[in-house]
Image (cartoon, rainbow, N blue to C red):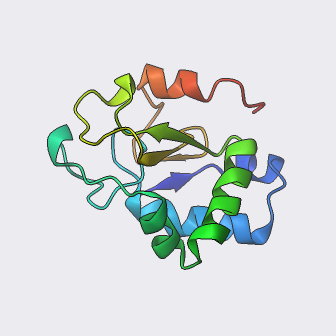
Amino acid sequence: MVKTFSTTLKKLNLKPADLGAIYKLLPYVHYETNLVCKNPFEVNPKNVEFCNKTELAELIGISRSKASEVLAELTRAGVIIEIKRKASLMSEAQGDGRETVVALNPSIVSRLQGEHENIMLLQLFNNADY
């Protein structure tokens, strides 16, 4: 189950297409990290299969160039952040640093009950006005 925080979403004044993109990503939000991946309930970090931008476009059902525009808008709105795969945040990640993964703001979307406890993830989104 994924919970969304409607009140927070309404404050963002996003276009319906942007809200649709968020909705389409919900089934792929990782349980603990809020990263978009192919296997959101995987507990072993080495086995999590993150989605790159091309795969995100496919999940949303739009072209890669349009997906880049939507992701940029969602980033500006504070809904998502994009992280280089080999970043220190994800020490278990594989890759050469050119791939980017996406995390959704836990103040907007979360699979966890109660407050999200991933302090680093919360800090990455702390500049948003909620």
Q: In this rendering, is residue 25 above or below 59?
A: above
Residue 71 in percent (x, y) is at: 64, 55
Residue at (46, 21) in percent of width and height: 120
Q: Quadrant of the N terminus?
A: bottom left
Residue at (45, 35) in percent of width and height: 114
Residue 97 in percent (x, y) is at: 38, 38
Quarter-of-image position of residue 69: bottom right
Q: In this rendering, is residue 127 above or below 62?
A: above
Residue at (30, 55) in percent of width and height: 40
Residue 87 in percent (x, y) is at: 39, 29
Q: Is residue 11 left or right of residue 98?
A: right
Q: Is residue 59 left or right of residue 32?
A: right
Q: Quadrant of the C terminus?
A: top right
User: Can residue 44 be seen in the rendering of this structure?
Assistant: no
Residue at (68, 61) in percent of width and height: 70
Q: How many circles with numbers are drawn on the protein?
A: 0
Residue nearest the observer in this picture, 95 or 113: 95
Residue nearest the observer in this picture, 54 or 37: 54
User: Can residue 74 be seen in the rendering of this structure?
Assistant: yes
Quarter-of-image position of residue 61: bottom right
Residue nearest the observer in this picture, 87 or 123: 87
Q: Is residue 80 left or right of residue 130?
A: left
Residue 35 in percent (x, y) is at: 41, 46
